[in-house]
Amino acid sequence: MELDWLLAPPLPEAVPRQQVLYRRLREAVLTGRLPSGTRLPASRGLAATLGIARNTVLFAYEQLVAEGCLIADRQGTRVAELPAAARASPRAVPALHVPQVLSARASAAVRREPAGDDEALPFSPGVPDFGAFPFRAWRACLERAWRDAGWRQLGYAAHGGDPSLRAALAAHLGSARGLAVDAAQILITSGTQAALDLCARLLADHRDTVWVENPGYLAARVAFGLAGLQVHDVAVDAEGLAAGADDWQRQRPRLIMVTPSHQYPTGRVMSLPRRFALIERARAAGAWIIEDDYDSEFRRGGPAPPALFGLQADAPVVHAGTFSKTLYPGLRLGYLVLPRPIAADFIHAAALATRAGQGIEQRALADFIERGHYTTHMRRMRARYSSRQAALRAALQQAFGPGLALSGGEAGLHLVMWLPDELDDTGVAARAAQLGLGVRALSAYTRPPVRCNGLVLGYGNLDEGAVEGAVARLKRAVGG
């Protein structure tokens, strides 16, 4: 039998020959090129024919026998009898479309929401300065956590999260955000997405209405849609979420998702009168407010505005925070601060809905906060990001002149650069990507009838020495 085609060129680069032989034999069996019952050469003979080691042939044969493609017995090695469906050529199998393999909700999310690019390119929003991370202090906390680890840290995390982290976080939120809370009100989550998913499932029922800001945080819209909620977009103005009478009457909410201290992505801050009004209207409607306080730690020019959670003792507010921006995204730790009346039941239900992990990291983070490293790091990064934003503003002003319009610099790690109507922000973002920039089009965060035209420019990972070069590339993308 002529089988020299099994290793005929071209061979895939960097793929071991045993894998190439296995894959080509398997394809030949599944496509019928080697029909059922075909007797294959002995391993020594095939190895000699192909000029390879016998172990290479043995690996392929043994793997295919284990998968049921081949049969090996006293009569030798031969192709197994396979059902017709398994014999179909891969080219003959119709392509699967997303709606055939995902739920309708997931399919809609895949079609409508672009996936974020994880590369830390210049101007990528939401990416902190990894080079300034206090590795030595964090490593020491991790080493202590591992040294003192017990069964609890190696198994699923305690309900609600590690007690030491919940206590340390309650103390930190009291001093940093003025929240008078205790550890029993805090639930540690695997980041903001997990927190939003829990709120959607535990505070609302299927097909309830959730309000999101427009423009707003895309991942929140996805999380709520996948949970089976009806997403209603509410426009944002200079004072934050601007719900009108029609919104309250025709789209009565069960959940209201807001970023009041630094609206994402526009950077606008919700005024104090509107905060009180929102709480009152939500209470009257029987709705819960989810307050995403994602980057208030990086407030410049004074303390952050008061959190919705602490404005009234009985406010129907759940406060969400994350360590993705303040430390690093891969840590995957966030938290919810819950009103006392629902805290115990919410945490118990969350334990039934999911199994939390990262016990070692939670214990290390508690140690990191208790030793003052977290506060010190925040103080250093506020100064660093403030200086970095100033350098970016100066470079943008120099490049684009007096007509430049910027917003969103009160806090956080990004600015919005507004574009004139004749420039398409989607096209500009595409050209910027070709130049190695992580710029995002502001219009991608909106839903009709709202139309915003601008660029979201992250500067957290943009070293001051690289600002001018990045802005020069941005100007080329804009067409200046």
Image: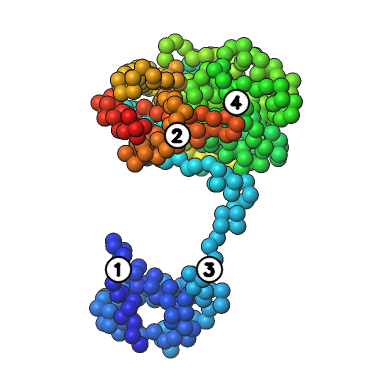
Q: Give the number of the mark in front: 4 or 1.
A: 4
Q: Secondary structure at mark 4?
A: strand
Mark 4 and mark 2: Cα distance apart in space: 21 Å
Q: Alpha-carbon distance for marks 4 and 1?
A: 56 Å
Q: Which of the two labelled residues, at mark 4 and mark 1, occupies the earlier sequence position? A: 1
**Residue 93 got which mark?**
3
Q: Where the C terminus falls, by quadrant?
A: top left
Point out which mark residue 424 bears.
Answer: 2
First-in-chain label (2 vs 3): 3
152 up-or-down from 421: above or below? below
Give the number of the mark in front: 2 or 3: 2
Tag 1 residue: 11
- Per the image, label 3 sits on a secondary structure element best described as loop
Q: Residues within 10 Å of mark 2 (few under 14, many from 20)?
A: some
Q: Earlier in the sequence, mark 4 or mark 3?
A: 3
Label 4: which residue? Answer: 235
Give the quadrant of the N terminus.
bottom left
- Location of residue 51 (image quadrant): bottom left
The quadrant holding residue 134 is: top left
Q: Residues within 10 Å of mark 1 (few under 14, many from 20)?
A: few
Residue type, numbered disc 3:
Val
Residue 272 seen from this side: yes
Element assignment for label 1:
loop
Q: Where residue 274 sits: x, y (%)?
A: 62, 15
Residue 47 vertical position relative to residue 448 in the rendered view, above or below: below
In percent of the image, x 55 and y 46: which residue is there?
Answer: 111
- Three-letter amino acid code at disc 1? Leu
Q: Are marks 4 and 2 in contact (CB under 8 Å)?
A: no
Counting residues from the N terminus, which is met first, the one under dot 4 or under dot 2?
4
